[in-house]
Image (cartoon, rainbow, N blue to C red):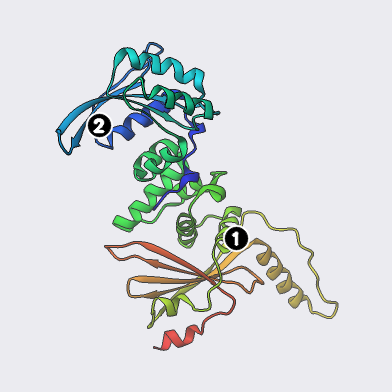
Amino acid sequence: MLFDEKDIDFKILNGAQFEDLCYELLENNGFFNLDWIKGGGDRGRDIVADINIDYEFLGKKTETWHFECKNHSTGIGEAEIHEKIGWALANLPDKLVFLVSTNITPDGKLYISKMQSRFKPIYYIEGKILKKFLLKRPALIEKYFMNDYRKVLRNSIREFQSRKIKTDSSRLEFILSDDKLISSYELNELAYLLYSSLHSNINSDVWNDIYDEIIKSISYKKESLLEVLNISKLTSRGAGTIYKENCEEKELVIPDDVSKEEEHYITLAHEQEQATAYDYTIYDFESLQYIQMKKPNSKILLEVVVDITEENFSISVNKLEEEPDIEDYLAR
């Protein structure tokens, strides 16, 4: 599963954590003999590292680079850069690189430009570019920027992908307690949770929120996933209802001319509708599971297809305004 830039929030890291992240990023990009100089007496560099550079005429040479790591809430200006470049003039590394979580201010960039003529190359990598490097190293994003809830979810997905072990209720309850679940998780992660609801006995209001977020995040399609994925020969497997924890407060209206028995069933149906997050029907087709989900009194049909082959695991989602003729696929 891929990350995007919104998953990388440098503000959650303190100074030491940001330096640790930079250290691992350099280690993952060909640098060696890394030395993390911790504490206040860094003399103008937080990390010292060697790298082999292959020059066309000179051949391969080993260079020593100094890195200054800055994780600030605002831009890095000339005053802060001045001191670090002064130390570089004294230490004479082959290159000095500023790794900053935000940006270099215009006056800071102008100062760096002026100092280029007096020193070997000075570079800076601002937060936007630093994120692009990190996106190529998803393991680092998972380690430094994901909370414990999402780490449990990702490990659960890996277990299901590799060994087909379904996520148990205790882990699901832990994941569902994350207050950032709807705002931060990827669509396929939410879809996996929705799929997991079919195999759990958890009543939670979050199921309804996940369902609504998926519906909001995808577009209508004219074709059913049955057509798109060329699914036929479905085997009916079963149906069920996923419940919310708290019922909605809706007025119960009972017609005057109904019997006591009819009134009883109207009341039961009303209570169940209030507590229902969505209903589902699940079918098998070879290594795929095809699932239809629908909220009570909704015209929108959510389709979910789960590929559970040994080599692959994927979830496809789609929403339709009209239900496909499922009997046709059952009969093929």
Taking the spot 45% from the left edge, 39% from the top edge, the residue there is 148
Q: Position of residue 142 (x, y in %)?
A: 39, 41
**To which quarter of the image does residue 228 belong?**
bottom left
**Badge 2: residue crowd in 10 Å (few <14, some 14–19, many ≥20):** some
Q: Residue at x 65, y 61 (%)?
A: 275
The location of residue 132, given as percent across then percent down, is: 40, 43
Residue 66 vs residue 121, the one in the foreground:
121
Above/below status of 308 relative to 16? below
Name the residue nearer the viewer: 36 or 182: 36
Q: Is residue 314 above or below residue 229?
A: above
Q: CA distance from mark 1 to mark 2?
A: 46 Å
Which of the numbered marks, if any, corresponds to residue 310? none
What residue is shown at x 38% (from left), y 82% (from top)?
232
For the residue marked with disc 2, what is the amino acid?
A: Phe
Dot 1: few (<14), some (14–19), or many (≥20) neighbours within 10 Å? some
| Image x and y of residue 35, in percent | 28, 21
The residue wearing badge 2 is 31
Quick one: SS at disc 2?
A: loop
Foreground residue, 243 or 42?
42
Q: Residue at x 84, y 81 (%)?
A: 257
Q: Earlier in the sequence, mark 1 or mark 2?
A: 2
Position of 306 relative to 188 (above/below): below
User: At label 1, which amino acid type do we have?
Assistant: Asp
Image mark for residue 212: 1
